[in-house]
Image (cartoon, rainbow, N blue to C red):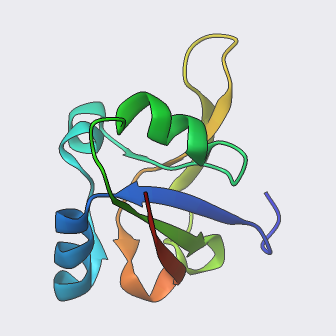
Amino acid sequence: MSSSETIYKVLTHKEWASFQSEGIFIGSDMDKKDGFIHAAFKTQYSNIIKKFFKEIESLILVEINVDLLEEGCLKIESNKPGGDEYPHLYGEIPFESIISHEVIN
């Protein structure tokens, strides 16, 4: 992954508010259960929203600068043997790494 690439994280409004107040994001309940923070590339987040967030009317999409993450915490891994590869974060997301955010419906 080149240093100019970005990744994305889908958050609920409650997660976003907590992220803003605490200055770090340590993961959703699903992230914590799986042992890493699920993220996505630009071409993947819409499918993630359809699959995992279809019951939620409004979400926050954050764009993350991978250069500002802790070194070594980002791993590109498949979701299952032979499956699509996704960015997984083994650590936290510092608020300073957020490039932008937008409300998505």
Residue occupying image coordinates x 80% and y 75%: 4
Q: Please identify the residue farthest to the top as the structure is shown.
A: 81
Q: Quadrant of residue 30?
A: top left
Measured along the vertical axis of the image, is residue 101 above or below residue 89? below
Residue occupying image coordinates x 50% and y 81%: 98
Q: Quadrant of residue 19?
A: bottom left
Measured along the vertical axis of the image, is residue 78 above or below residue 93? above
* Total marks in image: 0
Q: Classify residue 40 as left or right of residue 11.
A: right
Residue 93 drawn at (x, y percent):
39, 70
Quarter that holds the N terminus: bottom right
Measured along the vertical axis of the image, is residue 8 above or below residue 48? below
Residue 99 drawn at (x, y percent):
57, 84
In this view, the residue in front, 62 or 36, is: 62
Residue 38 drawn at (x, y percent):
44, 45
Residue occupying image coordinates x 33% and y 58%: 58
Residue 105 drawn at (x, y percent):
43, 57
In this view, the residue in front, 57 or 76, is: 57
In this view, the residue in front, 61 or 94, is: 61
In this view, the residue in front, 104 or 9, is: 104
